[in-house]
């Protein structure tokens, strides 16, 4: 009798993705993960175990760009143990660097810009056949397979409304790295939202660099119509959208935010500066007064609204007085949270020509003052919430044993004790706020 051959189980191939930057990049990483999983390549949390490593990069600030190159330097060492390892540079740095990245990092296998993410599976196959692929640029036809997205997280499903940006703010590299603005047709957006609802997501997050500038391609519908269409779909418990551009907010959009209870009372509305002269040099297209007035209208429509914002300190030519005006705006508007950064010159942008550079020590000192002011305001706001009850979506486990975390509809982080029965991740549980920290709330389950 002939002996049966021994079957040796082959370990599955693994991939590891590191993601920097905004929610758009987060969703692009989910799209890339989905394509690899369709090829039978499974995720790993350990880059040293991976057969494919993808760095999904951000180039909004210089630091993020330097970091991705230093990470590429670290990961290429893994090729000594695994000759089959493929390393890909993806995202905004990939678009910006293109061919140059292959010259700079000899072990880099391919480069994929944000508009070419849907082609990853073919790019990996082409590399396995020997080609070092550079897939950048903004083709008219783009692949977007909603079934090939590895939706991570139990509760939030993300949907892109707009790719790219046409605004050309003078400090920003996004129009170069993500290309001209393109809205997705409403029918495609609704199909993806329905798909996410069937999948069981509680919360839908609509994405775009200027999400409220969405327009039906070739039609008359605008973002207010889209909000109406998505918010009234059966099963949408929570609806968010990010990032809104102040100048593009219309009274109809404000009205929709006020009318639909399932639109979350949280809005990220980047102001960037509180001084009209700086806003003009930034090319933002609105004044401080217009911004403050919009915030007032939004709060009148939705009194429980939590506003967050972005601020750049040390923009070229920013004077002490202009910075003081920004502090004054923060004081007046009382943001629930604030993301502030020191200005970082980006290649090909106009801002460096629009004013003298601000001394880095002065910019650092301004940033610290801004954070200190905001922390006081934030703590005061959070303290005013003690005693209120919220339905929070359970998002994870706390650092301490017996604690869980969740998000309120207004997007605040809540820490609460699990009690006898821990709440399921992704479920909704009711809590009462018992204490306030600067960046989060402490609560008890009700
Ligand atoms: S709106 Fe301005 S800051 Fe925002 S992505 Fe477009 S150019 Fe950049």
Image: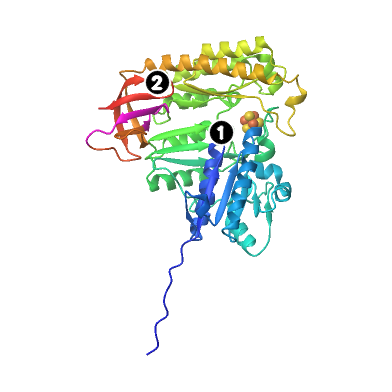
Outermost residue, bottom direction? 1
Left or right placement of residue 34 versus residue 424 in this view? right
Residue beneath disc 2: 437
Q: Position of residue 289 (x, y in %)?
A: 60, 13
Residue 419, magenta (yes or no): yes
Left or right placement of residue 150 versus residue 340 in this view? left
The quadrant the C terminus occupies is top left
Q: Is residue 361 above or below residue 163?
A: above
Outermost residue, left direction? 420
Residue plotted at (50% across, 47% down): 30
Q: Position of residue 396 (x, y in %)?
A: 37, 37
Helix, strand or loop at disc 2?
loop
Nearer to the camera, 198 or 177: 177
Residue plotted at (42% across, 18% down): 303
Nearer to the camera, 289 or 171: 171
Q: Which mark is residue 211?
A: 1
The quadrant the N terminus occupies is bottom left
Whether disc 1's CB lies below 8 Å from ligand 1 is answered no
């Amino acid at each position: 009798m002939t002996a049966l051959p021994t079957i040796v189980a082959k370990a599955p191939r693994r991939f590891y993705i590191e993601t920097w930057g905004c929610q758009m990049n987060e969703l692009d990483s989910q799209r890339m993960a989905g394509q690899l999983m369709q090829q039978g390549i499974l995720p790993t949390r350990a880059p040293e175990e991976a057969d494919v490593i993808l760095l999904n990069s951000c180039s909004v600030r210089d630091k993020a760009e330097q970091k991705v190159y230093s990470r590429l330097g670290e990961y290429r060492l893994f090729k000594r143990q695994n000759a089959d390892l493929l390393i890909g540079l993806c995202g905004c740095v990939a678009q910006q660097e293109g061919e140059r990245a292959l010259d700079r990092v000899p072990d880099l296998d391919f480069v994929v810009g944000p508009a070419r993410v849907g082609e990853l599976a073919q790019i990996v196959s082409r590399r396995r056949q020997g080609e070092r692929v550079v897939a950048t640029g903004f083709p008219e036809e783009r692949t977007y397979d909603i079934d090939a997205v590895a939706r991570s997280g139990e509760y939030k499903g993300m949907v892109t409304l707009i790719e790219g940006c046409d605004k050309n703010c003078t400090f920003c590299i996004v129009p170069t790295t993500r290309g001209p603005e393109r809205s997705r047709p409403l029918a495609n957006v609704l199909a993806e939202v329905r798909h996410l609802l069937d999948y069981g997501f509680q919360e839908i997050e609509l994405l775009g660099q200027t999400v409220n500038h969405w327009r039906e391609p070739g039609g008359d519908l605008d973002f207010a119509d889209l909000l109406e269409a998505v918010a009234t779909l059966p099963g949408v418990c929570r609806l968010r959208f990010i990032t809104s551009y102040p100048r593009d907010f219309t009274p109809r959009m404000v009205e929709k935010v006020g009318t639909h209870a399932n639109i979350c009372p949280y809005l990220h509305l980047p102001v960037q500066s509180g001084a009209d002269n700086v806003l003009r040099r930034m090319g933002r297209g609105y004044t401080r007064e217009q911004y403050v007035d919009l915030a007032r209208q939004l709060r009148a429509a939705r009194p429980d609204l939590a506003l967050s914002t972005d601020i750049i300190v040390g923009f070229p030519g920013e004077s002490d007085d202009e910075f003081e005006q920004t502090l004054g705006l923060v004081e007046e508007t009382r943001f629930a949270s604030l993301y502030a950064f020191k200005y970082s010159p980006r290649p090909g942008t106009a801002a460096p020509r629009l004013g003298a550079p601000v001394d880095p020590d002065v910019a650092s000192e301004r940033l610290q003052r801004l954070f200190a002011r905001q922390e006081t305001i934030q703590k005061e706001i959070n303290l005013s919430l003690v005693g209120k009850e919220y339905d929070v979506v359970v998002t994870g486990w706390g650092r301490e044993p017996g604690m869980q975390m969740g998000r309120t509809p207004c997007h605040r982080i809540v820490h609460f004790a699990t009690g006898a029965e821990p709440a399921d991740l992704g479920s909704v549980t009711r809590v009462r706020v018992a204490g306030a920290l600067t960046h989060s709330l402490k609560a008890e389950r009700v």
